[in-house]
Amino acid sequence: MNDDENRWFDDYVEESDDLQIDEYDITASPSDFNVSTLFNFVESGAVRIPGFQRNFVWDKARSSKLIESLILGIPVPQLFLYEQTRNRFLVIDGQQRLMSIYYFVKRRFPKRDKRSELRTIFDSEGRIPDHILHSDEFFEDFNLKLSERLPNRINKFNKLNYSTLGDYKTQLDLRPIRNIVVKQNSPEGDDSSIYEVFNRLNTGGMNLRPQEIRTSMYHSRFYDMLYRLNLNSRWREFLNTQVPDLHMKDIEILLRGFAMLISYESYVPSMVRFLNKFSRDSAKNSSDENGYLEELFCSFLNACVDLPQDAFINLRSNRFNIALFEAVFTATCADAYADRRLLGGRVSPAELSALIGDSEFGRASLEGTTKKLNVDVRLKRASELLSKL
């Protein structure tokens, strides 16, 4: 079954809104960092494993072979880093190698059943706190696990750890590893090229959706608020799916609603870049602002109490109609947002039916839904046909 058959939403962003990679000035520069420097980069938070990367999956034997190769001077694959700002990098490709080095120097190896939990801790703390690192619940000692390839021939590195390497410790610390540092030079204020860079260079075989990368790059208290709203039972009923989307499309739908409500006047395609900028700007929101937006959305759900559960479902495809939801949310909340108040009425089922049956709205919702003209038409017709609340 392909992705389109699994899709629970109606939208045309992925078909019509691709980034043009030639709009960006990108450079890739080789740099040789030694093992000690790379460890310090991770320890200090200068190098970060973005949230859209998979968990650490190597076993101790594979990580041990990497360490042995570095000690012996055997070439290892290069790392790809994306430079966000000066001395701040995201790992594009090479997480398994980098974290193997980090864990070996720390002399602790993560237990397999705790790796998802450790990833959450690493993302929130920027590092593994010492009390977690020394907990036998999460880690075990990292002594090299190397096979004896020849009979009666002992591998002199087997069962050693970082502190027992002797003279080889300095040899490991100073061993250089080739890094390719990818940097976007222009345009300023738009770092959307990370999507294409990651998907083209990452060797893990993942095709990521924009929201998966966006969530990692721009995570903030505003995003925490979106996560809470995404679990609202009434919202899940409208989406017609009780389980949060693996690729975070439901989070993106909420993000689009708020972005159109707050920043519609500045909207120009692509939607990817528009949502990136809105996410970046919303990271500066105060707690009061995020609290108001959360209450506003909940008041919108309350205002939809007379609507059927499938109010935003395209009855032909049985999928959630993003364009319809976006228009209804923006039109009904516009005055309330301008006045900094909550909604005080109810969305009329008859008015919603009139909007769904409106020929202009329908034409603007068929395809190319993120084109400026189509967005303008949809929001205009929703504003004309729906009562302000």
Image (spheres, rainbow, N blue to C red):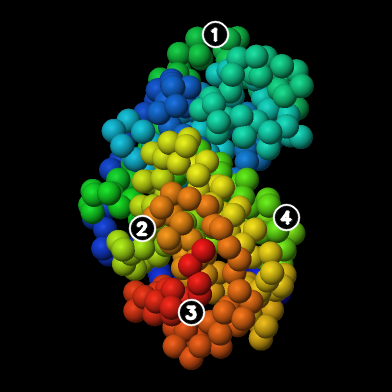
The residue depicted at 39 percent of the width and 80 percent of the height is 377
Q: Which residue is mark 3?
A: 385
- Check residue 337 in the rendering and tell me which mark sits there, or answer none: none
Q: Earlier in the sequence, mark 4 or mark 3?
A: 4
Q: Earlier in the sequence, mark 4 or mark 2?
A: 4
Q: Amino acid at mark 4?
A: Ser
Q: Amino acid at mark 3?
A: Leu
Q: Residue 173 location in percent, x, y?
A: 45, 18
Q: Which residue is mark 2?
A: 263
Q: Residues within 10 Å of mark 4 (few under 14, many from 20)?
A: few
The residue depicted at 66 percent of the width and 86 percent of the height is 316
Q: Residues within 10 Å of mark 2 (few under 14, many from 20)?
A: some
Spatial CA distance of label 3 from label 1 is 78 Å
Q: Amino acid at mark 1?
A: Gly
Q: Quadrant of residue 322?
A: bottom right
Give the SS element for disc 4.
Answer: helix
Q: Which residue is mark 4?
A: 233
Q: Earlier in the sequence, mark 1 or mark 4?
A: 1
Q: Amino acid at mark 2?
A: Ser
Q: Badges 3 and 1: C-beta atoms under 8 Å apart?
A: no
Q: Badges 4 and 3: C-beta atoms under 8 Å apart?
A: no
Q: Residues within 10 Å of mark 3 (few under 14, many from 20)?
A: some
> Given this view, does label 2 or label 1 mark the residue nearer the observer?
2
> Given this view, does label 3 or label 2 mark the residue nearer the observer?
3
106 vs 256: above or below: above
Give the SS element for disc 3.
Answer: helix
123 vs 143: above or below: below
Q: Nearer the viewer, residue 270 or 128?
A: 270
Of the 4 image quadrants, the one containing the N terminus is bottom right
